[in-house]
Image (cartoon, rainbow, N blue to C red):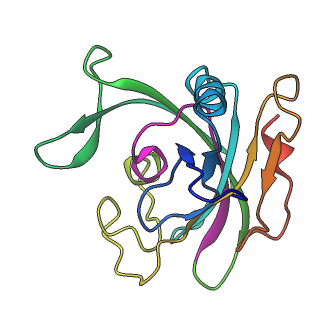
């Protein structure tokens, strides 16, 4: 922001205690353009995490998620009318002293989607007290890459160096 009192508008945020990329826009018009590509699922979103268990095979998860405002918790439901579709792909990267470092790509952006996908698949996300009941101090979930449609944005890749992955190849998912 190079002008005094210039406003910025949040476009993409993360769950509390999840590290990674947050996107802001300098104008309402840019915010709306960015939000439209997020809503139409044209954005590639890549995360890394560490789970306690050993995992060797990729995992594709399609589930319906709903949010209960009263309890403040998201949950998985079988009722398509009650929940929204959440699509999560997981690829194991390597084992380390803490567990298995995994790459995650989400096609949808539901609240607590990754945490629910991991927990409902029987795995423990390190540091996720809410869904995995892990007492680890830090939540081991980090968004390291966002890819916007190249034909709509001049700058379309936002990247942070992964914290736990050995191989930084987001395109394993393609």
26 and 101: which is toward the camera: 26
Whole-percent x, y for residue 3 in the image? 68, 56
Q: Which residues are magenta?
A: 99-116
Whole-percent x, y for residue 16 in the image? 41, 63
Kindly identify the residue that appears in the image at 13 percent across and 48 percent down.
71
Location of the C terminus (image quadrant): top right
Whole-percent x, y for residue 38 in the image? 60, 30
58 and 162: which is toward the camera: 162
Whether residue 98 is situated above or below residue 15 in the rendered picture: below
Is 112 one of the magenta-colored residues? yes
* Residue 33 placement: quadrant: top right
Whether residue 46 is situated above or below residue 166 in the rendered picture: above
Q: Residue furthest front?
A: 4
Kindly identify the residue that appears in the image at 63 percent across and 37 percent down.
27
Whole-percent x, y for residue 30 in the image? 67, 32
Is 48 one of the magenta-colored residues? no
Q: How many marks?
A: 0
In the visual, does 134 lie left or right of 70?
right
Whether residue 1 is situated above or below residue 126 in the rendered picture: above
Kindly identify the residue that appears in the image at 83 percent across and 39 percent down.
156
Whether residue 5 is situated above or below residue 163 in the rendered picture: above
Q: Residue furthest top?
A: 81
Location of the N terminus (image quadrant): bottom right
1 and 42: which is toward the camera: 1
In the visual, does 50 lie left or right of 159?
left
Q: Residue furthest left?
A: 70
């Amino acid at each position: 922001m190079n002008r005094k009192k210039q406003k910025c508008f949040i476009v993409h945020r993360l769950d509390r205690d999840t590290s990674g990329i947050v996107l802001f826009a300098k104008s309402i018009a840019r915010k709306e353009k960015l939000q439209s590509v997020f809503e139409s699922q044209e954005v590639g979103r890549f995360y890394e995490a560490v789970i306690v268990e050993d995992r060797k095979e990729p995992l594709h998860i399609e589930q319906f998620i709903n949010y209960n405002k009263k309890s403040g918790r998201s949950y998985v439901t079988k009722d398509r009318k009650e929940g929204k579709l959440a699509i999560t792909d997981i690829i194991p990267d390597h084992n380390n002293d803490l567990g298995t470092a995994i790459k995650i790509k989400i096609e949808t952006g539901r609240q607590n989607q990754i945490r629910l996908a991991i927990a409902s698949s029987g795995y423990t996300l390190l540091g996720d007290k809410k869904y995995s009941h892990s007492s680890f101090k830090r939540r081991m979930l980090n968004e390291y890459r966002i890819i916007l449609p190249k034909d709509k944005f001049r700058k379309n890749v936002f990247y942070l160096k992964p914290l736990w992955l050995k191989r930084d190849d987001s395109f394993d998912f393609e």
